[in-house]
Amino acid sequence: MATSHETDREYVELSLNYWAAFIVSGLVAGVLMGFVMHEVMGMIQAVGALYGTEGTTTGWAFHLWHAVVFALVFGGFFMWSRIEPFHDRILASTTLGIIWATFLWLVAAGVVMPLWLDGVGAMAPDVPALDPWSGLGHVLYGGTVGALAAAIHKHGG
């Protein structure tokens, strides 16, 4: 028979606190990556262009939306039982976040975004669009999502 603690642990992934950790992590990581996109690359407006507007404010809004959505997807993978031992191990979780972000850089930023921009008639880079600054921004994003999620999880968040 399962103890109360085992039952609670089994459903931790369904709790608001579990998902809130990824929302907060995604927002913080999105701001850091957005800084690279806006200040270094000068292209935060391209994210808004995906939705038909090229303004800086809408670029930031949609970028942060993407940051949260991709952090929540990472949270979904984080529920996998093989990854559970890493939930509160910050370095291991940071590494998993960097792996996730590298995948996002290669697929989402490298292929999907240029094709999407082209599809909406906006100026688009060639595929694959693997700008090293974008790669750095994605690594910063993933490392932050992984580290913060683990830190929040570790401290009972």
Image: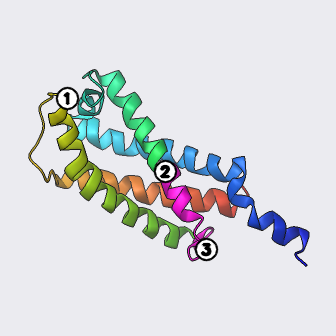
Frontmost of labels 2 and 1 is 1
Image x and y of residue 84, in percent: 62, 72
Magenta residue check for 87:
yes
Q: What numbered label is drawn on residue 120?
A: 1
Dot 2 crowding, Cα within 10 Å, few <14, some 14–19, many 20+: many
The answer to the question of whether label 2 and label 3 lie on touching residues, with beta carbons closer than 8 A, is: no
Circle number at residue 81: 3
The kind of secondary structure the magenta stretch mainly shows is helix
Kindly identify the residue that appears in the image at 44 percent across and 49 percent down.
70
Q: What residue sits 41% from the left and 57% below the top?
A: 142
Image mark for residue 71: 2
Q: Earlier in the sequence, mark 1 or mark 3?
A: 3
Q: Secondary structure at mark 2?
A: helix
Span highlighted in magenta in the image: 71-88
Query: What SS does tag 1 mark?
Result: loop
**Mark 3: few/some/many CA within 10 Å (<14, 14-19, 20+):** few
Which circle marks residue 154 in the picture? none
With 140 as the anchor, is 21 left or right in this view?
right
Residue type, numbered disc 3: Ser
Which amino acid does the dot numbered 1 rest on? Val
Give the quadrant of residue 23: top right
Which one is earlier in the sequence, the residue at label 2 or at label 3? 2
**Distance (Cα) linking label 1 and label 3:** 40 Å
User: Which residue does the image show at 71% across and 47% down from the upper left?
Assistant: 16
